[in-house]
Amino acid sequence: MFEGSVTRLFAAALVALGAGCHAQAHAHAQMSTSGDDDRKYEVEEAPSPAPVPGPQRPPPMAAAPRDVTYSLGVVHDLSLSSGATRAAACRCLAVGYGPPSDSKFTWQAGPPSVAPGTMAVAIAADGVACAARGYAPLRASISAVELDGDDVVLVVENVRDGAPAMRGALVSPPSDKGALVVRARRGAPYGAPSAGGPGPCRLPLQ
């Protein structure tokens, strides 16, 4: 009888042991399944985008070249050069004319860019012999450039000390029938021929 009781207890222990192992295996399976389920909802982290380079700063631009293109008319930086002839072309006035690059001219910033055929004209009263009665050497200045028929006309006056003197002009050459004409303004003596007689002073360019 005792032997049967031991056999029954041993069998019960085996059953309990088997149940425990089964429960542990079941729990482990649940944990594994739960872990797999959690991973299936995970979102794979995208790789960080490569840095985008900023806008390239353009290299500094070189300074634009100085525009030395002139319009026709009186110009402020032209004069007769110191080596140009100071013989009177009109009464008490030296007059030089020719291409802007001619050595008889002095430009403060160099000869300008002009249309083909443009003529430069420069005047000077200093150093020119003058026997005009009552005339005191002052500063000759071109006050205007005009067209009169076929002629190109320079209007010349005297300006007081301290006032700007305009000694040059750019003009279109007169036609074959025309001339470069100098007329005086405000009582200046320049608008007469160098040999005397009434004005105006006409300088044929042919």
Image: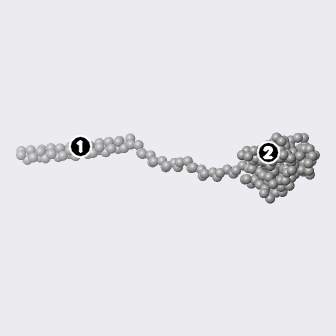
Closer to us: 45 or 11? 45
Q: Which residue is mark 1?
A: 23
Q: Residues within 10 Å of mark 1 (few under 14, many from 20)?
A: few
Image point 21% across, 43% down: which residue? 19
Q: Residue 123 in the image: state x and y as whole percent.
A: 81, 50
The quarter in which the N terminus is drawn is top left
Please say if the residues under marks 1 and 2 sit with CB atoms less than 8 Å apart: no
Using the numbered discs, state the Cα–Cα distance from disc 1 to disc 2 in whole angstroms: 126 Å
Query: Is residue 87 shown to the viewer in this render?
Result: yes
Secondary structure beneath disc 2? strand
The amino acid type found where label 2 is placed reads: Asn
Image point 78% across, 56% down: which residue? 81
Q: Residues within 10 Å of mark 2 (few under 14, many from 20)?
A: many
Q: Which residue is mark 2?
A: 158
Q: Residue 13 in the image: state x and y as whole percent.
A: 15, 45
Of the two numbered discs 1 and 2 on the same chain, state the one appearing first in sequence. 1
Numbered disc total: 2
Left or right for 1, reference 182: left
Query: Is residue 145 shown to the viewer in this render?
Result: no
Left or right for 57, reference 186: left
Residue 104 against residue 142 in the figure, above or below: below
The amino acid type found where label 1 is placed reads: Ala
Number of the front mark, 1 or 2: 2
Closer to us: 73 or 27? 73
Secondary structure beneath disc 1? helix
Image point 77% across, 51% down: which residue? 78
Image point 45% across, 48% down: which residue? 47
Q: Residue 112 in the image: state x and y as whole percent.
A: 76, 51
